Amino acid sequence: MDIVFTVISLGLLALAGVALFDLFQRRHSLLRIYPIVGRLRYLLESVGPELRQYIVTNNNEERPFSRDQRRWIYASAKQQNDYFGFGTDNALDQAENHILLRHSAFPLEQPVAGHPLEVAGYPLPCAKPLGAARGRRRAFRPASLINISGMSYGALGGPAVAALNQGARLAGCLQNTGEGGISQYHQQGGDLILQIGTGYFGCRDDQGRFHLGRLRECLAANPQVKALEIKLSQGAKPGLGGMLPGAKVTAEIAQARGVPAGQNCVSPATHSAFSNVDSMLDFVERLGDETGLPVGIKSAVGERDFWADLARQMDRTERGVDFITIDGGEGGTGAAPLAFSDHVALTFKIGFAQVYRVFLDRGLADRIVFIGSGRLGLPEEAMLALIMGCDMVHLARETMLSIGCIQAQKCHTGQCPTGITTHHPWRTRGIDPELKGVRAANYIIHLRKELIRLSRACGQVHPALVATDRCQMLDAGHVLRSLEHTFGYEKPAFALSEDDRADITELMERLEPPAAARQ
């Protein structure tokens, strides 16, 4: 009896020791929030492939991100082995819309350990300067064409926002604030794109209308803001406003948004500062003139007339946007009605192609920086977007995965198990911003590395130089489709001026070791 008691006591002490270790370690959010119990996930994950092979789903069936895709992001963030063995497990002879890149017979040499590209963190600057075409006083060339998309403080908890901002600082990229304004968690050293939504949070008057003086005050207090993005709509819920219930409007959220604490915080469905393309362009120029910053718009793609009118007025007048962010209907959100998530707005590939063709045909595409958003955080998807004409790619859910998201799809409940999309004190304590910031940066840098490797396999030093004929879509029955045929481009989507092509080639080649050193 004494022996049994001793064994049980030792077992309980061991469990208590493990629980204490889990509670105070900072690397794993799940274990910090759910000591001991959280370890079951890692156990099940370790034997998951064997179980799924016989009784559950395969590696490519889960949505919105498959198990293979999540595994690649997790491995990239943790700097683990991201290779896959035994060849592809995709049924290529039965594939639909499968992306294929046509590599060069004489590819460029790939960077290896110690290569200047690796030492520099695989820099991949935007091929076009942002704001330069319209002469903005604070025009600049984004140092990274991979950036963090708009996720508001409020939709995300404070530690998650802080982790992403630290990741932006470490990776040398931009973080979009989302429409919820700039909080203390955005002030960790990372540069920002300030998103201005229909609620004008952070730059509004007491009646909820846009207030230029408040915007000036916000920018004066936050010199890390490098551009302004006017949000017209987002992919997961276009044409729909929103409301943050008063019970969730904490003092911190109220301060960031410029609203009263404890009261319902409404985002209208449409802007009050403008009502059509003409007045929108006046608003854009007003912001550009007053701040000197590049000014752009973000929108999902619905009606075509809006884009045709925008291109026509930009062509005929002296007004225009510096960048356009296209959000696909497959994009993510913290909460949306199912009908809006599934059935409103075009998918990214179709929507972007339609919009891009409008500006390409008018000869304006080389004067605008195009940004793609909507599940583009895998190398092949980002590469396709860049070949289609995007100059930058902005990522949201993928960066959430990099800091610990497990795709539980409970963002709308306030019960996020990893503490990312909640303000619950016990759950948010699972996120250590410094450690998770490193993981976000690792993922962004690794994605840039993969894009550089794919570009060099195609014989170019930068994705912006890869021609559309290098990419095709594979359908069942071994049918190949060109991008021109698939997306209706009447001519190759090469909207880079000769000067921009020369500049980006020179920037990338500066990081090449001398020829003698390569031999």
Image (cartoon, rainbow, N blue to C red):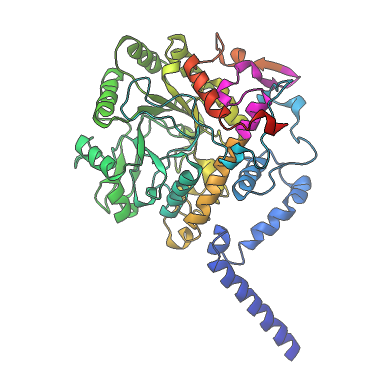
Q: Is residue 224 above or below residue 227?
A: below
Q: For the image shown, how many numbered marks are present on the structure?
A: 0
Q: Residue at horizontal 41%, vertical 18%?
A: 367
Q: Position of residue 84 (x, y in %)?
A: 74, 41
Q: Is 446 situated left or right of 209 in this image?
A: right
Q: Is 124 situated left or right of 476 in this image?
A: left
Q: Residue at horizontal 32%, vertical 52%?
A: 249
Q: Is residue 453 magenta?
A: yes
Q: Is 288 in front, or is 237?
A: 288
Q: Is residue 216 magenta?
A: no
Q: Is 116 situated left or right of 242 in this image?
A: right
Q: Is 176 situated left or right of 108 in this image?
A: left
Magenta range is 450-479
Quadrant where the C terminus sits is top right
Please say whether residue 328 is visible from this viewpoint.
no
Q: Residue at horizontal 54%, vertical 36%?
A: 123
Q: Residue at horizontal 38%, vertical 51%?
A: 185
